[in-house]
C-alpha cells in the first residue's frame, strides 16, 4: 500500500481542493493507495524572517515555532507528495509560498529521495504554466522524483467542456504519477540532476567547513565521495561527464 499526501495551498475548499481530491481519487482507481489532503490553512505556518540560522546552524535552531516539522514529517512518512496551488498574481498563493520558504533549508540539504512528486496549478485565465514549471523545479530540488505537473482552467461559471478537459488532464497526470509511484524509486540521475549535485557539493566542499550545517550534512551522507545523492550505477558517459562537472565547478568556485 502506497501513501500519497496532497498539500493544498488555497484557504478555501474551492477548485484547488477539488482538483487535488479528484487527482487522489484517480490514483486510488489505479491501485492500492492511501490518501490524505493537508489543507495548509489548517496549520500554523509562520513567515520566514530570513535569519538564515537554518542554513548555517541547522533547522532545529529556527526561532519560529510553528507546524513546519509536522508537515515535513508527513512528507517523510509518505511515498508520494502533491503540491496543489491556485495561481494568485502569476505565482503560487502566498499560503503555498510561505510553506515553501519554511522548507528553504531542505533545498540546501535535500532529503525526499525515492518519493514521487507532482504539482497542480489551478487558475482563472493565465500564467499557470510557468508556475507548473516552478513547482516541478521545487520538487526536483527537494530530491523528489518529479512527474510533470498540470495547469487547470477553472474560470467560473465552469462549463461542462471545461470540466471534461480537467478530467482528462487529471486522469493522464494520475496515470503518469502512479507509474512513478510504483516504480523502483532510485533511478539513475539525468545529466541535469548530476550537474546540480556536482555543483552543489563542490561549493559546499570548497566554501564551507565543519562549522556549517550544509557541510556536515554532506559529509555525514558521504556525498563528497559518492557519485550522486543515493547509490546508483552511472554509465561510462555519465561517469566521465560527472568528473568533468567536478573539475569545472572546482575551477569556477576557486576563481570566485
Ligand atoms: C488574489 C487572486 C489572484 C489571482 N490571480 C490570478 C492570476 O494571476 N491568473 C489567473 O489566471 N487567475 C488568477 N486568479 C484566479 C484563481 O487562480 C482561480 O479563481 C482559482 O480557481 C482559485 O482557486 P480556488 O478555487 O482554490 O480558490 C486569482 C485569484 C485571486 C483570489
Image (spheres, rainbow, N blue to C red):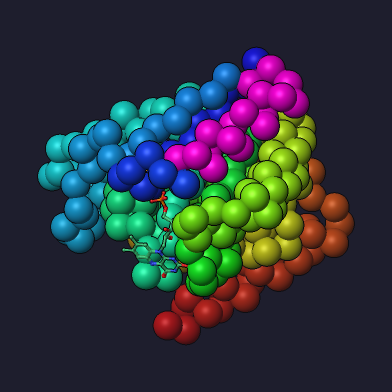
Seen from the viewer's position, the closer of residues 3 and 185 is 3
Image quadrant of residue 30?
top right
Seen from the viewer's position, the closer of residues 14 and 74 is 14
Q: Is residue 221 left or right of residue 164?
A: left
Q: Is 171 rendered above or below residue 156?
A: above
Q: Is residue 112 in view from this perspective?
A: no
Residue for point 23% across, 43% down: 45
Magenta stretch bounds: 17-33
Within the magenta stretch, is there residue 21?
A: yes
Q: Position of residue 50 (x, y in %)?
A: 20, 60
Within the magenta stretch, is there residue 209?
A: no
Seen from the viewer's position, the closer of residues 68 and 14 is 14
Q: Is residue 27 in view from this perspective?
A: yes
Q: Is 18 rendered above or below residue 93?
A: above
Q: Is 241 rendered above or below residue 214?
A: below
The quarter of the image holding the N terminus is top right
Q: Position of residue 248 (x, y in %)?
A: 62, 76
Residue for point 62% across, 28% down: 25
Image quadrant of residue 60?
top left
Residue for point 73% across, 57% down: 190
Classified by dominant secondary structure, the portion drawn in magenta counts as: helix
Residue for point 35% across, 57% down: 93
- Extreme right residue here? 236
The quarter of the image holding the C terminus is bottom left
Displayed-image quarter of ligand 1:
bottom left
Q: Is residue 219 left or right of residue 146?
A: left
Q: Position of residue 73 (x, y in %)?
A: 39, 28
Amino acid at each position: 500500500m502506497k501513501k500519497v499526501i496532497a498539500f493544498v495551498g488555497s484557504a478555501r475548499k474551492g477548485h484547488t481542493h477539488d482538483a487535488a481530491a479528484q487527482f487522489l481519487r484517480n490514483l486510488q482507481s489505479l491501485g492500492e493507495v492511501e490518501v490524505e489532503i493537508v489543507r495548509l490553512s489548517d496549520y500554523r505556518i509562520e513567515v520566514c524572517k530570513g535569519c538564515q540560522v537554518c542554513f548555517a546552524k541547522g533547522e532545529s535552531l529556527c526561532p519560529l515555532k510553528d507546524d513546519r516539522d509536522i508537515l515535513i514529517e508527513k512528507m517523510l512518512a509518505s511515498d508520494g507528495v502533491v503540491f496543489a496551488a491556485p495561481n494568485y498574481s502569476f505565482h503560487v498563493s502566498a499560503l503555498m509560498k510561505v510553506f515553501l520558504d519554511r522548507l528553504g533549508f531542505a533545498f540546501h540539504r535535500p532529503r525526499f529521495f525515492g518519493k514521487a512528486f507532482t504539482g497542480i496549478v489551478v487558475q482563472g485565465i493565465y500564467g499557470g504554466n510557468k508556475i507548473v514549471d516552478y513547482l516541478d523545479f521545487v520538487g526536483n530540488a527537494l530530491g523528489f522524483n518529479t512527474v510533470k505537473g498540470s495547469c487547470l482552467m477553472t474560470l467560473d461559471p465552469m462549463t461542462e467542456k471545461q470540466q471534461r478537459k480537467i478530467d482528462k488532464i487529471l486522469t493522464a497526470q494520475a496515470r503518469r504519477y502512479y507509474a512513478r509511484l510504483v516504480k523502483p524509486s532510485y533511478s539513475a540521475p539525468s545529466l541535469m540532476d548530476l550537474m546540480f549535485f556536482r555543483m552543489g557539493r563542490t561549493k559546499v566542499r570548497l566554501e564551507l567547513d565543519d562549522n556549517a550545517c550544509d557541510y556536515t550534512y554532506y559529509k555525514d551522507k558521504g556525498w563528497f565521495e559518492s557519485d550522486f545523492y543515493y547509490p546508483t550505477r552511472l554509465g561510462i558517459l555519465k561517469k566521465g561527464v560527472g568528473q568533468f562537472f567536478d573539475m569545472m565547478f572546482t575551477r569556477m568556485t576557486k576563481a570566485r
